[in-house]
Image (spheres, rainbow, N blue to C red):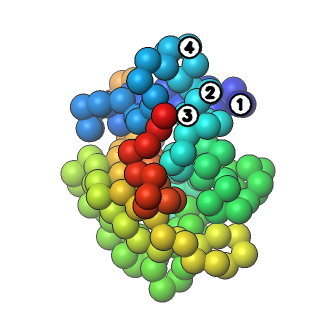
Amino acid sequence: MSATDLTLLPLLEASYRHWLGQSLPRPAGLPQAEALTWLHERAPYALLAHGNESDPLFCYANEQALRCFGYPRAEFIGMPSRFSASPKDRAARQVLMETVVRQGYASGYEGWRVDQAGRAFMIHAGVVWNLLDREGQHLGQAALFWPDKERIGQVE
């Protein structure tokens, strides 16, 4: 895990807790000292974030997100996040992002995304929230989604 990941993951967690009133899903009893590693390396759901640029760029992706999108980390980080959706699905994705800017978060999202090879895949039980720093300044947005509908909520 990079130094940037170690900085961003606690902000993703704190912002999720701010908007949704709970921690990111994880196994019961997981020691806090192991939580960041679990979220980054072993979470069964994708966790990713983009910045607040005019054309937002991905700044974080856990291992599950990289598997879903089929990119090596070096190519995914810095890529415009709009490329996570196919051209025909980008308008719906943009509406979701604008809703999150206004409301702070949106949950229960399902939609199509596209991997590096252009193959479409469905995301389930998606949550998107505004990413805030410790002073409450908007840094971008973060997202969690489940790639497997049958495993939604299963973290053990």
**Residue tagged 1:** 1
**Residue tagged 4:** 33
Q: Looking at the picture, which amino acid does disc 2 mark?
A: Thr
Instruction: Give the quarter of the image for residue 7.
Output: top right
Taking the spot 26% from the left edge, 38% from the top edge, the residue there is 20
Q: Earlier in the sequence, mark 4 or mark 1?
A: 1
Are dots 1 and 3 in contact, CB under 8 Å? no
Taking the spot 74% from the left edge, 49% from the top edge, the residue there is 73
Q: Earlier in the sequence, mark 3 or mark 4?
A: 4
Secondary structure, mark 3, is helix
Q: Nearer the viewer, residue 135 or 115?
A: 115
Q: Nearer the viewer, mark 1 or mark 3?
A: 3
Are dots 2 and 4 in contact, CB under 8 Å? no
Q: Looking at the picture, which amino acid does disc 1 mark?
A: Met
Q: Nearer the viewer, mark 2 or mark 1?
A: 2
How far apart marks 4 and 1 lie (CA) works out to 14 Å
**Is 28 on the left-hand or right-hand side of 71?**
left
Q: Which mark is residue 37?
A: 2
Q: Which mark is residue 39?
A: 3
Are dots 3 and 2 in contact, CB under 8 Å? yes
Taking the spot 41% from the left edge, 24% from the top edge, the residue there is 28
Q: Badge 2: few (under 14), some or many (20 or more) residues near its Cα, within 10 Å?
A: some
Q: Nearer the viewer, residue 109 or 8?
A: 109
Residue 86 in picture, x, y percent from top left: 54, 79
Are dots 2 and 1 in contact, CB under 8 Å? yes
**Is 9 on the left-hand or right-hand side of 97?**
right
How far apart marks 2 and 1 lie (CA) works out to 8 Å
Secondary structure, mark 2, is helix
How far apart marks 2 and 4 lie (CA) works out to 8 Å
Q: Looking at the picture, which amino acid does disc 4 mark?
A: Ala
